Amino acid sequence: MPARYNGTMMKNCIAASVLVLLLLLSTKVFADFSVEGKLALQFADGQQQQQAFPMQLIREQGSYIFSVGSQQTRLNAPLQKYSLALILQNDQDVWVTDFANQPLNGFTLEIAGYQITLRRDPQARAARGRYVVQLNDEIFYFSRGPGQINFVFNEQGIAEVQVKSMFKPRR
């Protein structure tokens, strides 16, 4: 009876060791995701343009391909977040180089249930250049440096959108 007990115990130990080894070797695997977005641009010269603005992460040949708008890059690991920089130059021109190679007066991006808008508001006297960024119902003004819109990812796609380096006006 003791020999059979030792054999069963040995099998359980081996099974537990294999399970622990598999858990240690496994890494968090992000699923592929693709999120469609709509972008409307208002350029400083008065022209307007509408375009698709998709975000997607695809695993391919042991690496990840992240695409945003018309840009694409290959990564060794899945991207945790994507940051969109908004640069206010001389309180006049806003540059968002991921959108266009010229200054903007405004834009509206609708993606994953979020609406992000940049616009000039004559009533926003405390805002630099009177530019206002709106994320759904929240209003933000430019601070001293560039503004940032961070898209935080999870396995399904965009988990959250955050506005950074900007401030909320007093009410």
Image: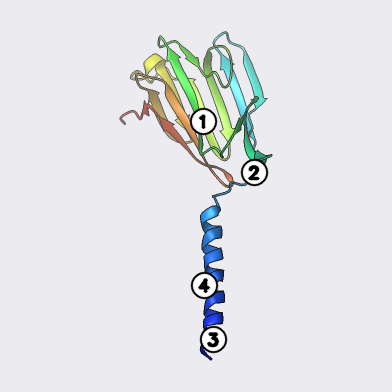
Q: Crowding at label 3, few (<14), some or many (≥20) Cα neighbours within 10 Å? A: few
Could you tell me which residue is drawn at 62 percent across and 47 percent down?
31
The circle on residue 3 is: 3
Could you tell me which residue is drawn at 54 percent across and 18 percent down?
97
Of the residues under marks 1 and 4, which one precedes in the sequence? Answer: 4
Where is mark 2, residue-wise? 32
Where is mark 1, residue-wise? 116
Q: Is residue 38 visible?
A: yes
Is residue 74 shown left or right of residue 124? right
Q: Is residue 98 above or below residue 54?
A: above
Asked which secondary structure carries label 2, the reply is loop
CA–CA distance between discs 2 and 1? 24 Å
Where is mark 4, residue-wise? 13
Is residue 158 shown left or right of residue 91? right
Q: Pointers 2 and 4 in contact (CB under 8 A)?
A: no
CA–CA distance between discs 1 and 3? 69 Å
Q: Is residue 31 above or below residue 145?
A: below
Could you tell me residue 164's position as x and y percent? 40, 30
* Nearest to viewer (mark 1 / mark 4): 4
CA–CA distance between discs 1 and 4? 55 Å
Of the residues under marks 1 and 3, which one precedes in the sequence? Answer: 3
Could you tell me which residue is drawn at 61 percent across and 26 percent down?
39
Could you tell me residue 133's position as x and y percent? 45, 26
